[in-house]
Image (cartoon, grey):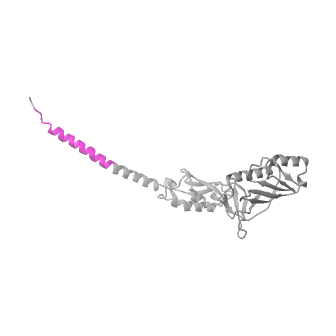
Amino acid sequence: MARYDTSWQNSAKKKRVARVRWARVLAAPAAALGLLLVGWALIHSPLLRVREVVVANAARVEKEAVSDAAKAARTGFIRRAISPANLLGWPGALPPEAVALVPGAEAIEVDRSFFTGTVTLVVREREPVGIWCFEGDPSAPVCQWFDERGVVYSRTTPGEGSLIAVAHDLDQARAGSGRRVLQDEQLAHFLAILAILRERGISPRVMEVRSGSRAELSMTTYGGPRLIFTLRTPPDQVEPVLDDFIKRGALGGLTYIDFRSAKRAFYQ
């Protein structure tokens, strides 16, 4: 039987295997180098250069404060390695710690236009409900704006008037957990009372809150009686009582109405 020399086939096979092995070894560095080159080109591309930074929807907050917060947030950006002069160096929104630097802002989103090179900082402002004055420490009262979630966000001066709700908290010296003026249940009852009065055109002149164990709200009104409420239970009995007095035209002749008892109101 004739024998054939296959050594050249084995040699060719080994060379092919070696070439494949080296190709695999060099593939990863080549791909990494390619990505680095693409990244460098993107970062330094004039097409991605920021030409203008605009602050939008800032009706009550200071635009300069928004710009400063964006600059301060650079250290916390995931893309902090990229220059802020590049559109890719901006996130979709500023982080919470940066938003906290802007009193009155609930969130700040970032809109990038790759056509115009514009970065727009879109502010979502808090909706102010009124002013909460913490007077638990009479020597150092603090008044702050609070929103519909009961979160205080900016210091202000105490006021009095029918257009702005001003609550004087006689128990607390500062806002509670989460910078909240009241716990969820008490806050819901407080806001419900304000809504009931607003719907009937009754304006509180001075409001006093006992946010401690008593959990009460009392107020003087313009041309009407003193009103006293509990914050422990929903104000279900308030509407029918007020509507009855208003219907009879007797509300202005009363000295006070006490709604603290369940399903019963005392008046004089």
Q: How far across and how far down the image is residue 167, in percent?
A: 75, 60
> Residue 214 vs residue 246: left or right?
left
| Quarter of the rendering occupied by the C terminus | bottom right
Residue 21, compared with residue 224, is above or below; it is above
Q: Depth check: 112 or 76 in front?
A: 76
Answer with the quarter of the image where residue 257 lies.
Answer: bottom right
| Quarter of the rendering occupied by the N terminus | top left
Q: Depth check: 129 or 70 in front?
A: 129
Answer with the quarter of the image where residue 20 lies.
Answer: top left
Q: How far across and how far down the image is residue 199, in percent?
A: 80, 49
Residue reaching furthest left? 1
Residue at 59% from the left image edge and 61% from the top image edge: 67
Is 7 inside the magenta-drawn segment? Answer: yes
Instruction: Count the labels in the image.
Output: 0
Q: How far across and how far down the image is residue 17, in percent?
A: 24, 42
Residue at 18% from the left image edge and 38% from the top image edge: 9
> Residue 16 vs residue 193: left or right?
left
- In the image, which residues are magenta? 3-27
Dominant SS type (magenta): helix
Residue reaching furthest bottom? 139
Is 57 inside the magenta-drawn segment? Answer: no
Q: How far across and how far down the image is residue 63, in percent?
A: 64, 60
Residue at 91% from the left image edge and 54% from the top image edge: 253
